Image (cartoon, rainbow, N blue to C red):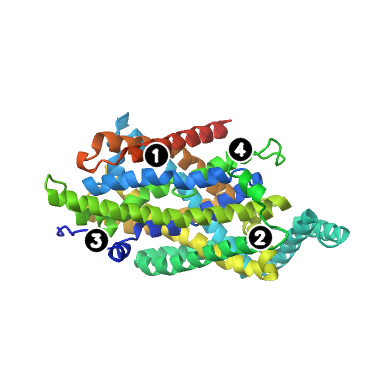
């Protein structure tokens, strides 16, 4: 067993110990932002900016509370959740729902690998049919944008749009995206087997950071074009208002928004994965086994401080990224009536960058889409394989030891990409698959809120209790979870 380690005492030393939050940020700036958040902007315009910001910020309090519990007791998140009071059969009700949610997270992963496949199929089609399909669909989308914005010759744009739509209808959907998705799944499984996580994560983090920066710059440069976000539009998004009824024909933006609420920022899946990365980073190991000594208390306070800084810095990163994606979706897609869906999801999302980058936009976006979506796919596969291996032990399918759990983790991480690929090939609807997981995670959020309150008031070490302001924010966080989860469940059933 390793010897406990004193926490860092200087800012630079503390920054060197950060990491779990950035790993999570690498998975957060992905399907939730690139797909779900922009789709909310495309459907609701600027009205729901407040909901997007709230969805990022309020989850951090629960995230830190779960991390505090992990450092205090050195338990995995699922072991901790299994102690929440309530009905149980082998495991308790929260862990049972987690098992159901996991199936839909595999579906979300299928949507993500499908998005990666689409991006690669557009940039590098594998068949002649794929090249023809790309040309036709690109022409159709560009003509639709011209019609919506009233630029150029309207009659000519309408003629091009009609011709491209007719040609697309006569052409079968090519298989390029499915072929690329298969290649990506196989490659990821091989990388997982040989344990190349560190290298891929380092490269992915750099690429995601670069694309996020490009997105923020795009939003800034957009302010110098006809597509600029006005002060009144931005202010409207912060007024806690809902989109007017009938804003989009046949579409209820709140359904999409609340589904997105479950996966933007810290989704339920990330809230569960975060303590695992804290364990692997060594926060609990460095604190040592809990005892009554003042030395343990000092170490625990110090490492909890490191965890809090890690959580809040990562929250700043993904909140800015989320807001940028949302505003781009509202400024370009909503104004033009474009809504990312189906096989044209990536192609439609690329239009957000056209007003700034022009003909270069598709190359810029395809690079970013690959970096962001693949990073999410890889990080979630690595992180969730740890959760699933832990869960199998709780269900009695293995002895629950750390050595056994690590063996299962390796094999699950190899199989996970193929499970995701199977859902994509079966459903072939990336956006719907991502949003279905969002609904499941939104319903999971109130359960995690209940667990966080249980940890705070029934399992917390009295020497590590937070202040009253923290308690108030934790209750607000849990109340927000309850509202979002209940509304998502109601809308889904309705």
Crowding at label 3, few (<14), some or many (≥20) Cα neighbours within 10 Å? few
**Label 4 to label 2, Cα distance in Å?**
24 Å
Identify the residue at horizontal 54%, vertical 31% (top origin): 490
**Circles 1 and 3: CB atoms closer than 8 Å:** no
**Circle 3 — which element?**
loop
Q: Quadrant of the N terminus?
A: bottom left
List the residue tagged with mark 2: 223
Q: Quadrant of the C terminus?
A: top right
Q: The residue tagged with tag 4: helix, strand or loop?
A: loop
Count of marks placed on residues: 4
Callout 2 touching callout 1 (CB < 8 Å): no
According to the picture, the residue beneath numbered tag 4 turns out to be 241
Q: Cα distance, mark 3 to mark 4? A: 45 Å
Q: Residue furthest left?
A: 293
Dot 1 or dot 3, earlier in sequence: 3
C-alpha distance separating marks 1 and 3: 27 Å
- Circles 3 and 4: CB atoms closer than 8 Å: no
Query: On the rendered structure, is 422 left or right of 230?
Result: left
Mark sitting earlier along the chain (3/4):
3
Label 2 near label 4: C-beta < 8 Å? no
User: Which labelled disc corresponds to residue 9?
Assistant: 3
Residue 159 at what x, y percent from top left?
85, 59
Q: Residues within 10 Å of mark 4 (few under 14, many from 20)?
A: some
Cβ–Cβ below 8 Å for labels 3 and 2? no
Please give the label number shown on residue 400.
Answer: none
Task: State the residue lying farthest toward the top.
Answer: 87
* Numbered label attached to residue 473: 1
Q: Earlier in the sequence, mark 3 or mark 2?
A: 3
Element class at badge 2: loop
Across and down, in percent, residue 143 comes to 78, 60
């Amino acid at each position: 067993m390793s010897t406990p380690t004193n926490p860092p005492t200087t800012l630079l030393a503390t920054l060197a110990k950060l990491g779990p939050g950035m790993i999570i940020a690498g998975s957060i700036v992905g399907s939730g932002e690139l797909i779900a958040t922009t789709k909310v902007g495309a459907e609701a315009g600027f009205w729901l900016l407040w909901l997007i910001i709230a969805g990022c910020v309020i989850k951090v309090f629960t995230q830190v509370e779960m991390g505090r519990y992990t450092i205090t007791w050195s338990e995995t998140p699922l072991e901790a959740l299994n102690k929440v009071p309530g009905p149980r059969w082998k495991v308790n009700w929260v862990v049972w729902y987690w098992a159901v949610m996991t199936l839909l997270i595999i579906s979300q992963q299928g949507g993500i690998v499908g998005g990666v496949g689409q991006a690669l199929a557009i940039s590098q089609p594998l068949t002649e049919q794929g090249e023809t399909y790309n040309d036709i669909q690109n022409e159709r989308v560009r003509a639709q944008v011209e019609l919506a914005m009233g630029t150029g010759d309207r009659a000519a744009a309408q003629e091009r749009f009609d011709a491209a739509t007719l040609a697309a209808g006569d052409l079968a959907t090519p298989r390029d995206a499915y072929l690329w998705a298969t290649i990506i799944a196989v490659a990821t499984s091989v990388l997982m087997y040989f344990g190349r996580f560190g290298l891929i994560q380092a490269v992915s983090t750099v690429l995601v950071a670069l694309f996020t920066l490009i997105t923020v710059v795009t939003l800034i440069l957009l302010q110098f074009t006809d597509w600029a976000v006005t002060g009144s539009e931005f202010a409207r998004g912060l007024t806690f208002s809902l989109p007017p009824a009938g804003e989009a024909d046949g579409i209820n933006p709140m359904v999409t928004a609340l589904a997105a609420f479950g996966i933007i920022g810290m989704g339920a899946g990330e809230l569960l994965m975060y303590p695992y990365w804290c364990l692997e980073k060594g926060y609990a190991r460095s604190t040592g086994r809990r005892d009554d000594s003042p030395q343990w208390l000092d170490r625990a306070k110090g490492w909890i401080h490191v965890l809090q800084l890690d959580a809040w810095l990562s929250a700043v990163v993904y909140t800015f990224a989320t807001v940028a994606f949302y505003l781009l979706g509202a400024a370009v897609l909503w104004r033009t009536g474009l809504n990312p869906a189906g096989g044209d999801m990536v192609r439609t999302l690329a239009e957000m960058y056209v007003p700034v980058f022009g003909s270069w936009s598709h190359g810029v976006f395809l690079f970013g889409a690959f970096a962001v979506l693949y990073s999410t796919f890889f990080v979630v596969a690595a992180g969730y394989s740890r959760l699933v291996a832990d869960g199998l032990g709780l269900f009695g399918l293995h002895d629950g030891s750390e050595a056994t759990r690590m063996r299962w983790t390796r094999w699950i991480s190899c199989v996970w990409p193929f499970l995701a690929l199977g859902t994509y090939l079966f459903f072939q609807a990336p956006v719907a698959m991502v949003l279905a997981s969002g609904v499941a995670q939104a319903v999971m959020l109130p359960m995690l809120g209940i667990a966080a309150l249980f940890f705070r008031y029934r399992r917390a070490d009295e020497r590590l209790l937070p202040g009253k302001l923290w308690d108030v924010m934790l209750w607000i966080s849990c109340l927000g979870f309850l509202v979002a989860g209940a509304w998502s469940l109601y809308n889904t059933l309705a």
